[in-house]
Image (cartoon, rainbow, N blue to C red):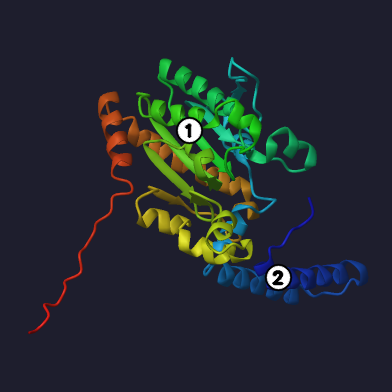
Amino acid sequence: MAHYALPFEKPVAELERKLDELRHLTNKQNVDVAHEIARMEQKIAETRKEIYAKLTPWQTVQVARHPLRPYALDYIRDMATDFVELHGDRIHRDDRAIFGGLAKLDGQRVLIIGTQKGRDTKSNLECNFGCAYPEGYRKALRLMKLAAKFRLPIVTLIDTPGAYPGIESEERHIAEAIALNLREMFTFPVPIVVTIIGEGGSGGALGIGIGDRVLILQNAYYSVISPEGCAAILWKNRAYADRAAAALKITARDLLQMKLADEIVAEPLGGAHADPKLMAQTLKQSILANLRDLQTYTPEHLLKLRYEKFRVMGVFEERQKAVASAGP
């Protein structure tokens, strides 16, 4: 896929175009412009750093959806070994929007489950643009039960706009499939590390999102609804998606502050797509560090902490305003 620049990245794209012209001049006319090239490269780095230091929530959503951003199977390729994919829910079919299998992370045996998007029309249709059917969640549950049986830690990688909302999903009981996963993931006596690597959309993300540790990449987001969907409901116009993104508090920083996420995994400057291999190694180290910590707990203590972690989410306080007594 050709280089793709987001709207707010236009200043960097323009500088990169000029840099390409300088390099072309060097190759074609044998002109020494090494000093100018070095200066331009430094300016590009500084401009990109300045832009990414002050991303708005809506711009963060755009980065999370970047077409060149690594998807779950890309991370498997770059950070895992001996990956053996397991297929099917043993009821209906194999849903390609959710994959899972056995793998090793630096020798640590794990079960990895992830949501997957496509790079082109064919692959997007194959995995339904990352929107899973009920059978996808039933496959995930079958594999997690297998991991629990053999005492393997579970790692999930989430990148989905949400579960598929069509009539086929309703016919095959999508709500029941997700709800069952929510309940059962509280019962598995093995460490579970969840990572939102891109989009974390609604119940589609939460269906494999119950864990002892919830990690989120720096430019990913996690939300009960998409900004566009929220804008369509509140303002009757999807054009207000930027306002909705800010109101929803969906960025990694917001989620960490509200204790809905436990750790932010830093991305390379310019986003995960700027250096996918470095991003994969950073993510692997974060996952392994959390697994090592979780493996110090007994299964009983692990289940207790997992329940308490999610039980306090959404707790709020009501404060009654003092009413000044009226005079005679």
Which residue is outermost to the bottom? 328
Q: Is residue 88 left or right of residue 184?
A: right
For the point 28% across and 50% down, the residue is 315
Q: Which x, y percent locates residue 52?
A: 56, 66
Under tag 2, what secondary structure?
A: helix
Q: Which x, y percent locates residue 226?
A: 56, 52
Mark 2–mark 1 CB contact (< 8 Å): no
Q: Is residue 326 left or right of residue 315?
A: left
Q: Which residue is mark 1?
A: 155
Of the 4 image quadrants, the one containing the C terminus is bottom left
Q: Is residue 146 left or right of residue 27?
A: left
Q: Looking at the rendering, which quadrant does residue 87 occupy?
A: top right
Q: Is residue 155 left or right of residue 89?
A: left
Disc sitting over residue 10 in the figure: 2
For the point 35% across and 23% down, the residue is 189
Towards the viewer: 175 or 260: 175
Q: CA distance from mark 2 to mark 1?
A: 36 Å
Which residue is outermost to the right? 29
Task: Pick whichever of labels 2 and 1 is earlier in the sequence.
Answer: 2
Disc sitting over residue 137 in the figure: none
- When the figure is inspected, residue 99 is found, relative to residue 31, above or below; the finding is above
Q: Which x, y percent locates residue 13?
A: 73, 68
Q: Looking at the rendering, which quadrant does residue 28 occupy?
A: bottom right
> Which amino acid type is marked by label 1?
Val
> Which amino acid type is marked by label 2?
Lys
